[in-house]
Image (cartoon, grey):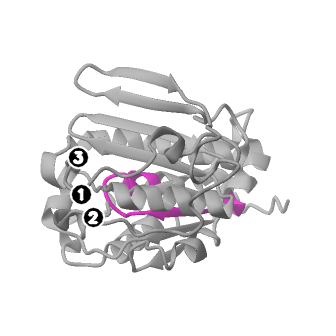
Amino acid sequence: MRFDFTEEELNRYSRHILLQDVGVEGQEKIREGKVLVVGAGGLGAPVAMYLAAAGVGTIGIVDGDVVDLSNLQRQIIHTTPDVGKWKVESAKETIQAINPHVKVEAHREFLMADNALDLVGEYDFVVDGTDNFPVKFLINDACVMAGKPFSHGGILRFEGQTFTHVPGSACYRCMFKSPPPPGAVPTCSQAGVLGAIAGMLGTIQAAETLKWLTGVGELLTDKLLTFNAKTMDFRKIHVKKTDKCPICGPNPSITELIDYEQAVCDLKNHG
């Protein structure tokens, strides 16, 4: 490891360095990390901002949409003057304003079956910040195929859920075998979401990412963390990797990535 932090960097990251479990060594691991955030929306926004503040060396952002006025209620990486701007460009500007030491790789496209493995393969850790089931399954399948760890996150109305997958632990399909039919389950664009919920879950996902990069603490592997903000009840559900899983089991039936059909209203709502 290099340990060639400047005085400005040592001051910037001093609260991390003071942590006995992190220190200079942990901060160097953060600086060497490469994280892909899929979706620059409700979840991706707080994730990217906290990862940038923490000093993650390279942050990739994948999103093919532009900023809409309705996004600003929860997508805090964007501001009013950004309406109409590509989300990845708006996010890049905010990240670089937070921390000029971070390299931002803006991928102005949606994650699809034909580009997922190439994108995922460039990074150490992937964060699911999307708002629809087809892309969540695509992220899961691509990461399992590529042997990449990732953080899953989902929000709706007043509720959120998240877990972390590392090779060998339960994946999304171990819990939910396949996407629901298009339109069967509403998304945030249909049912609404309390804006602060995105921040609550996004910061948990950012913390999981930093824990993985530094090797500190216990990850949310083989556990599904859920919460309801109306009551502030948090629940941790233990899950198991299953041999019958069609993607991570010993005899996978899924051998190539699939672009599942999305509901029409979700085609431009990946975040």
Nearest the viewer among 211 and 28 is 211
Q: Quadrant of the N terminus?
A: bottom right
Q: Distance between the Cα atoms at labels 2 and 3?
A: 11 Å
Task: Give the amino acid at mark 2.
Answer: Gln
SS at mark 3 in the image: loop
Tag 1 residue: 182
Tell me which corner region of the image, top left, top right, bottom left or bottom right, holds residue 118.
bottom right
Task: Give the amino acid at mark 1.
Answer: Pro
SS at mark 2 in the image: loop
Marks 1 & 2, CB-CB < 8 Å contact: yes
Nearest the viewer among 232 and 147 is 147
Please say whether residue 56 is visible from this viewpoint: no
Mark 1 or mark 2: name the one nearer the start of the chain: 1
Q: Is residue 182 found left or right of 40 in the rendered image?
A: left
Which contiguous range is marked in magenta?
31-48
Q: Residue 239 in magenta?
A: no
SS at mark 1 in the image: loop
Residue at the image position 70 percent from the left and 51 percent from the top: 27
Residue 113 at x, y percent in the picture: 47, 73
Q: Is residue 137 above or below residue 87?
A: above
Task: Give the amino acid at mark 3.
Answer: Val
Residue at the image position 68 percent from the left and 32 percent from the top: 217
Q: Quadrant of the C terminus?
A: bottom left
Tell me which corner region of the image, top left, top right, bottom left or bottom right, holds residue 58.
bottom right
Q: Distance between the Cα atoms at labels 1 and 2?
A: 6 Å
Tag 2 residue: 262
Residue at the image position 48 percent from the left and 24 percent from the top: 236
Any mark on residue 185, and which?
A: 3
